[in-house]
Image (cartoon, rainbow, N blue to C red):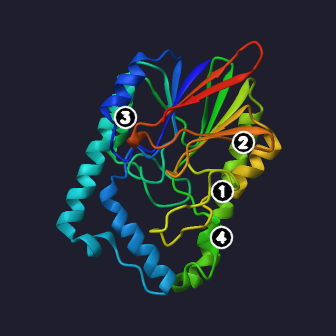
Amino acid sequence: MKAIILGDFQGVFPKKLKERLRKKDYDLIIGVGDYGGINEFRPYIRDLFIRLKKGEKRISPEEFFGKDKYKSMVKKDFKQTKNVLKEINSLNKPFFSVFGNTDEDWYKHPIYKNKPKKEALNFIKKLKNMSNITYGYKKFQDYNLIGFGGYMDIDAYFKKKTFKSEREKIAKKLKKHKKVGKIFFNLMERANKKEGNRIFVFHYPPKGIFDIIKDKNNPMDGESAGVRYYSEAIKKYKPKLVLCGHMHEYSGMKKLYGVPVINPGDAGEGKYALIDIDDDTGKIRMKFSR
């Protein structure tokens, strides 16, 4: 089985990347999310983290950008997400995907309030090659693709020193985080009963792999963006392979508990991974674009 792994487009599908993918030989595409989330939003995220670390109250994106500008940005983001998904679908390969934290208009979170827009749901239905496994699993040949995407609260958000102005909310956030963890492990248990080699498809990285933020302009520099119970699931279930994204700082393969973990890199910059699993021997070969 040969698979192209893609993620973190942030609303941009480079022309050169499309041309390269059309020339490659592969059986399916696996997406790790963040098809939207245009870079124009980044100044607000940075400002938000600075405010919270200083102990100041957060402001809304409407207040930061102005209502009209923010409305225009949201509209642009939705349009560019549609374009990215449409282009992937046009490659005419089975496309299995989780959505990422910046794709909030495209999926329903099991705990938080965001729900997919009706327009998004109708659009996905028209994409004949796409299977949404954001909180589910699906079989491809002898491989069971198990997905868990969307927004996640990471460990750093629970540190009182990190977010001084929202200390009173930490206990409530932790409670929700544990609830999401139960939903995650329930999914893992159900999927584990299915036949076939397991491949975990996450958006966020597991704790301990591709998870340390390396950005001097980011107030979260040096913190981990990894999810602890992803790592626990890898240790317990020992899947064939783990795919993740979210962290634009990384591209490559590392092992956690002996299991290969792959971050394909930032597709918005033309990066991707090609994995080739020998169906007879189980040997995995991989290539990363640079």
**Tags 1 and 3 touching, CB below 8 Å:** no
> What residue sits right under mark 3 in the picture?
85
> What residue sits right under mark 4 in the picture?
174
> What residue sits right under mark 2 in the picture?
188
**Tags 2 and 4 touching, CB below 8 Å:** no
Q: CA distance from mark 2 to mark 1?
A: 15 Å
Residue 272 place in picture, x, y as percent = 49, 34
**Tags 3 and 2 touching, CB below 8 Å:** no
First along the sequence among labels 2 and 4: 4
* Residue at the extreme top: 280
Give the side of residue 212 with respect to residue 97, left or right: right
Residue 186 place in picture, x, y as percent = 72, 46
First along the sequence among labels 1 and 3: 3
> What residue sits right under mark 1 in the picture?
227
* Residue 15 in view (yes/no): yes
Give the side of residue 230 with respect to residue 257, left or right: left
Above or below — where is 168 with respect to 32?
Answer: below
Q: Nearer the viewer, mark 2 or mark 1?
A: 1
First along the sequence among labels 4 and 1: 4
Q: CA distance from mark 2 to mark 4?
A: 21 Å
Q: Nearer the viewer, mark 4 or mark 3?
A: 3
Q: What SS does tag 3 mark?
A: helix
**Tags 2 and 1 touching, CB below 8 Å:** no
Type of residue at label 2? Met
Type of residue at label 1? Val
Q: What SS does tag 2 mark?
A: helix
Q: What SS does tag 4 mark?
A: helix
